Image (cartoon, rainbow, N blue to C red):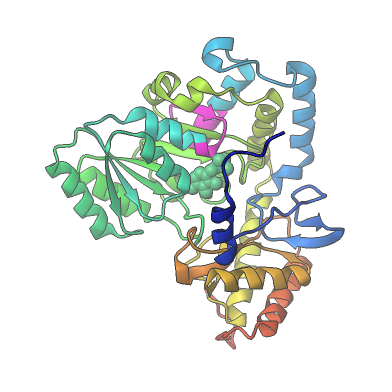
């Protein structure tokens, strides 16, 4: 046996030197409000399982039943092996959910962005993108030959300038792309203003609602529903791995968009589709979201409670408006130290540093779910207070607890 004939020692050393080398955390339990790590039960503030659907009995039953009826795998890519009717049923359901004519599912939210951005734009076109858009949008943009125009985060004047530049450059079709909810800060895109600016410039809008679906809008329909912008956003990308609790991605829009992606979206063409169990669990999830509106209500109650608790303790939670609440502490090293101290005190919340966020904006990112109890949230807040004291963090506590959320 020979060793791998490339050496990655220098790269790994660099990561260690910057305090960015992190072993994977191994869970011996489902992703739930609490998780088991190294034999200890910890309160879980790290998952995107907003509505607790990941462990919902109806999803588990639907997945088991689908294996019995449809088998374990889907055979091959859909253009070659044919497509199972359950896949089409999910797409019809997603189009209804998003209020669009059609939808197409992909293996993940990541591949959905690659399929759309890599598939629908040509060399004469332009993509205008928020600087803090998710990595999958950035990678999708790398796959397109269209001109690329980046505007500063949520900066409407910057957006207008880029639209003007694209026009001057004689671009044929222009697509403005934004996250619906930004994944590191939990702020909501200024979608009504973005849509207005785009419409004025004759551009189309695409929103990636990975963190907004199941969270914003009626029954969790997402940011377009939240702002009443039906019919004015050409492409809605989403994931089935966050609030929906399973796995997968989709692009919802016109029938033309769906037809084009089936022929031009490379992840659709060259990678096999979901196993039927995944599809069935997603269908069950969409039904549960409709049947159990209390899940969404509890998610927001917990969000307000936890966010105002953190702010009362004096933590800097940035501009968060959603269940994603960052606790911003500075350098990556400080974020990792806070995460470790929290772990010692029974809370699982990951530290995030440069290059995922700016160098001085390292943070512990927290996400509450509808499954967390008041008691769990109180214990988590106590752990934050104790960890901050242990690290002598500089906090600015608020006496009256009038934290906005
Ligand atoms: C998580 C996320 C994705 C990726 O979704 P997966 O289904 O996990 O691949 C895409 N876009 C945004 C904005 C995300 O937050």
| Quarter in which the N terminus is drawn | top right
Closest to the observer: 375 or 42? 42
Taking 120 as reference, is 244 left or right? Answer: right
Q: Is residue 194 magenta?
A: no
Residue 34, compared with residue 376, is above or below; it is: above
Residue 357 in sight in this render:
yes
- Measuring from the top left, give residue 285's x and y in whole percent: 67, 37
Residue 9, compared with residue 374, is above or below; it is: above
Measuring 69% from the left and 53% from the top, which residue is drawn there? 24
Closest to the observer: 297 or 316? 316
- Measuring from the top left, give residue 175's x and y in whole percent: 30, 39
- Measuring from the top left, give residue 194's x and y in whole percent: 31, 51
| Furthest residue in direction bottom, as rendered | 399
Measuring 62% from the left and 41% from the top, which residue is drawn there? 241
Residue 209 in sight in this render:
no
Closest to the observer: 107 or 229? 107
Location of residue 313 (image quadrant): bottom right
Residue 314, compared with residue 236, is above or below; it is: below
Closest to the observer: 217 or 50? 50
Q: For the magenta stretch, what is the residue range?
A: 93-110
Measuring 55% from the left and 55% from the top, which residue is drawn there? 10
Location of residue 124 (image quadrant): top left
- Measuring from the top left, give residue 225's x and y in whole percent: 46, 45
């Amino acid at each position: 046996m020979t060793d791998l004939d490339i050496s990655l020692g220098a790269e790994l050393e660099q990561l260690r030197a910057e305090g960015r080398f992190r072993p994977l955390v191994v869970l011996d339990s489902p992703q739930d409000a609490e998780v088991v790590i190294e034999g200890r039960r910890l309160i879980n503030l790290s998952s995107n399982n907003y509505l607790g659907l990941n462990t919902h009995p109806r999803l588990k039953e639907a997945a088991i039943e689908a294996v019995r009826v449809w088998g374990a795998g889907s055979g091959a890519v859909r253009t070659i092996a044919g497509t199972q009717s359950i896949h089409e049923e999910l797409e019809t359901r997603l189009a209804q959910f998003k209020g669009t004519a059609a939808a197409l599912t992909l293996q993940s939210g990541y591949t959905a962005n690659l399929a759309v951005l890599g598939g629908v734009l040509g060399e004469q076109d332009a993509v205008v993108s928020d600087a803090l858009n998710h990595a999958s949008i950035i990678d999708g943009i790398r796959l397109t030959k269209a001109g690329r125009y980046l505007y500063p985060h949520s900066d409407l004047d910057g957006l207008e300038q880029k639209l003007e530049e694209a026009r001057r450059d004689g671009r044929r079709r222009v697509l403005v792309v934004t996250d619906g909810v930004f994944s590191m800060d939990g702020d909501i895109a200024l979608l009504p203003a973005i849509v207005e600016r785009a419409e004025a410039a004759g551009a189309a809008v695409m929103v990636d609602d990975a963190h907004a679906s199941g969270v914003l809008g009626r029954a969790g329909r997402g940011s377009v529903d939240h702002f009443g912008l039906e019919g004015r956003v050409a492409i809605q990308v989403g994931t089935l791995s966050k609030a929906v609790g399973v796995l997968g991605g989709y692009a919802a829009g016109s029938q033309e968009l769906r037809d084009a992606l089936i022929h031009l979206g490379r992840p659709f063409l060259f990678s096999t589709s979901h196993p039927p169990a995944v599809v069935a669990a997603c269908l069950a999830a969409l039904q549960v979201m409709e049947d159990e509106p209390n899940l969404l209500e509890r998610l927001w109650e917990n969000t307000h409670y936890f966010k105002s608790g953190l702010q009362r303790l004096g933590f800097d939670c940035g501009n968060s408006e959603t269940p994603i609440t960052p606790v911003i502490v500075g350098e990556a090293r400080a974020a990792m130290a806070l995460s470790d101290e929290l772990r010692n005190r029974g809370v699982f919340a990951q530290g995030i540093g440069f290059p995922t966020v700016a160098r001085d904006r390292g943070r512990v990112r927290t996400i509450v779910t509808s499954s967390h109890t008041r008691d769990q949230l109180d214990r988590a807040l106590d752990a934050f207070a104790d960890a901050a004291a242990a690290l002598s963090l500089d906090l600015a506590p608020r006496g009256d607890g009038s934290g906005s959320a």
